[in-house]
Image (cartoon, rainbow, N blue to C red):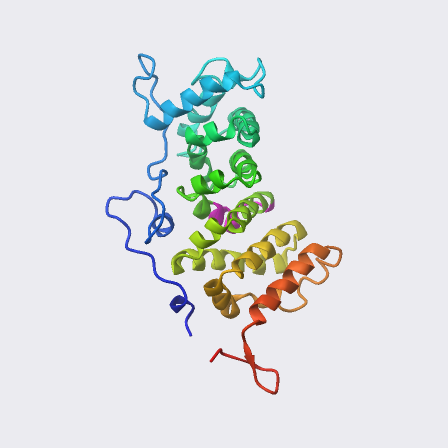
Amino acid sequence: MKISTLLPSAAAPAPGNDASASTKSWLTGSGAAPSVAVGLPTAPAAPTAPGEGRSSSEHRASIFLARSRRCSHFCAHCPFSQRPGHGGFLEIVNIYPSINPPTLTAHQSNRVCNALALLQCVASHPETRSAFLAAHIPLFLYPFLHTVSKTRPFEYLRLTSLGVIGALVKTDEQEVINFLLTTEIIPLCLRIMESGSELSKTVATFILQKILLDDTGLAYICQTYERFSHVAMILGKMVLQLSKEPSARLLKHVVRCYLRLSDNPRAREALRQCLPDQLKDTTFAQVLKDDTTTKRWLAQLVKNLQEGQVTDPRGIPLPPQ
């Protein structure tokens, strides 16, 4: 049986969508939530009057920043709270011209990462999180996650941007997952999981894990073959790389993602055919010798994939009748 027969195919992408082919497969499909991330925000021209020349996202962002002044989480020295739409927020949008073409310097990266660190506090605080999402602030970070330069300034920028999204998903709020599923965060994380630094891979995989642990997120990823196969392919590549360059911390998140996928019946059937052999044998025995939690997850994953299979007298698994 082919894996592709286990999950339905996504609908054809809508014409005129500027997103990449990879992103289209995530943001389309029957029942998929409409995307708010097609057409990422760009650095705005300086308005000649309050509110003039701003996109709706930029306007919402300015309103959010103004309201944040009333939150006790914002101290008087926070640049976001001094002038709505200026200060720290402009540190973020004004850096866009330096990411394409990639001319970002270490000094520029440090400045914008300091602003992103403040946003991480806002994203994790219960008094500002909802307004943070309503203003679509995460979308202003996605251009940074799109970058591919391997230089330290860009890697630092991607990692700090991932930290903001990680702070959001760590709250386990349904509102956060619902918002992220309307954006391209999953394919962005998958690309970083494939080619980023170990630390960036770890944060990106953690974000994917938290999305999968939500029932809506699991259903979304397993809704079409294209989405599931993309996730399974990247996780498989990571397992192969981890067998050569072990990282217990990263492996832990990868195994948890696989285990959660096995909770979906169609994904479980597909995983029986595509789960990497390295997770079935003793490849990671030494890496996990002191990690009882990951070993338990891995044992449960193998058990989940074995359940429902028919075995002949010699112990050879046979396909279900």
Residue 277 visible from this viewpoint: yes
Could you tell me what secondary structure mostly forms the magenta stretch?
A: helix
Residue 146 visible from this viewpoint: no
* 290 relative to 98 in the view: left or right: right
Q: Nearer the viewer, residue 313 or 17?
A: 313
In the displayed orientation, state which residue is furthest to the left: 15
* 209 relative to 57 in the view: left or right: right
Question: Which quarter of the rendering shows the N terminus?
Answer: bottom left
Q: Nearer the viewer, residue 148 or 21?
A: 21
Asked if residue 43 is among those painted magenta in the image, a careful observer would answer no
State which region is magenta: 189-198
Q: Nearer the viewer, residue 232 or 217?
A: 217
User: Quadrant of the rendered structure where residue 56 is?
Assistant: top left
In the displayed orientation, state which residue is furthest to the bottom: 313
Residue at the (38%, 68%) spot, across then down:
5
User: Percent x, y for residue 85?
Assistant: 42, 18
Q: Is residue 205 above or below residue 242?
A: above
Residue at the (59%, 55%) spot, across then down:
256
Residue at the (69%, 55%) spot, across then down:
293
User: Percent x, y for residue 42?
Assistant: 36, 29
User: Percent x, y for residue 218?
Assistant: 48, 53
In the displayed orientation, state which residue is furthest to the right: 290
User: Percent x, y for residue 169?
Assistant: 54, 40
Q: Nearer the viewer, residue 93 or 315?
A: 315
Asked if residue 195 is among those painted magenta in the image, a careful observer would answer yes
User: Quadrant of the rendered structure where residue 242 is?
Assistant: bottom right
Numbered label tally: 0
Q: Is residue 37 above or below residue 91?
A: below
